[in-house]
Image (cartoon, rainbow, N blue to C red):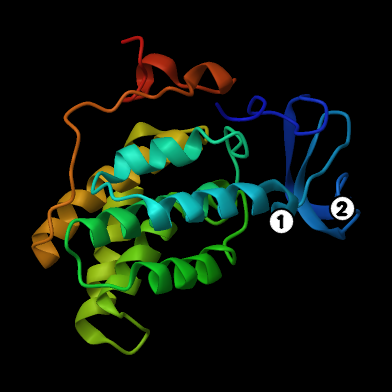
Amino acid sequence: MTIGRANCLICEAPIVYSDEAMDVTCAICGKQEKGHCTCSKGHYVCDACHRTKGVNAGLAFALHTDSANPIFILNRMMADKSIYPNGPEHHTLVGAALIAAYANAGGDIDKEAALKELEQRSLQVPGGTCGFWGCCGAAVSAGQFMSIILKASPMTPEPWGVVQRLTSKILSALADIGGPRCCKRTGFTAVLITIDYVAEITGIQMIKPENVKCAFSDRNDECLKDRCPYYPKK
C-alpha cells in the first residue's frame, strides 16, 4: 500500500497552497527553490525527493510486466510502498502503464526505449500542474504516451492534432468530475479514455476492465467519496 496519507511527507500535517511562489527549502535534501506549498508546520519536499523512488519502481514494473491491462499495471505501480497518495510521480506512472500495455497488446514500439523517453519527458512536469497550470499531469502523461507511439513533434501535422485531441478529452472529463486533486482519480480517468482512443486511432486494443474501484480512497483526506466514479463504497 502507498506510503502515508495525502498530507505532509515529514509530519502528516495538512498541505497549504499559496497563490504565489515563495522561497522554500526541501526538508529532505536541503535544496532551495521557489515553490507553492508547504505543510501547516512549514515543511517542504521538492519534486525529486517526492517522486524518484516511486518513478524508478514504476518504470521497472512497467518494463517487465506482460499485462495488456493498463489499469491493472497502474494499480500495481500505485500500490508500491514508494508511491504516495498524491504527487508528481503519477505524471510518469500513467504514461508508463499505457506504454507497457500498448506494447504487450501488440503495439509496434520498443517498450524499453519508449519508457526511457517517457521518463525524460515526464520528469519535466512539476507537481501541482492541475491547479497552477490548468492542465493535470495525468492528461499530460497520457499525451506524452500518445506522442511517443505516434512519433509526434511540433512539426507533424496529423499526429500533432491527434495528441491534442486526447489530452483535451481527458481534461474535459476531469473538469466534469471536479476537484480537489486526486492523482488516483485523474490517473484512472486518463487511462480509461486513452484505451478507447488508442483503439480508434491505431487499432490496438488494450484490455479495458468493466469496473474500476479505487483501493486508495481511505488514504486520501480529500477523497470526493460518492462524487468519484471510482469510489469503492458506492
Residue 84's spot in the image, x, y percent? 61, 35
Provide the secondary structure element on which disc 1 rests. helix
Residue 70's spot in the image, x, y percent? 30, 46
Residue occupied by mark 1: 48
In the rendered image, is residue 139 in sight? no
Position of 55 relative to 42 (above/below):
below
Task: Determine the image quadrant of residue 174.
Answer: top left
Residue occupied by mark 2: 29
Residue 141's spot in the image, x, y percent? 43, 58
Residue at the image position 77 percent from the left and 53 percent from the top: 35
The reply, left or right, for residue 186 in relation to residue 170 is: right
Q: How many neighbours does mark 2 have within 10 angstroms: few (below 14), some (14-19), or many (20 or more)? A: few
The reply, left or right, for residue 59 in relation to residue 160 is: right
Closest to the observer: 130 or 72? 72
Q: Which amino acid lies under the numbered mark 2 shown in the image of this protein?
A: Cys
Residue at the image position 52 percent from the left and 65 percent from the top: 119
Decide which of tag 2 and tag 1 comes sooner along the chain.
2
Q: Quadrant of the C terminus?
A: top left
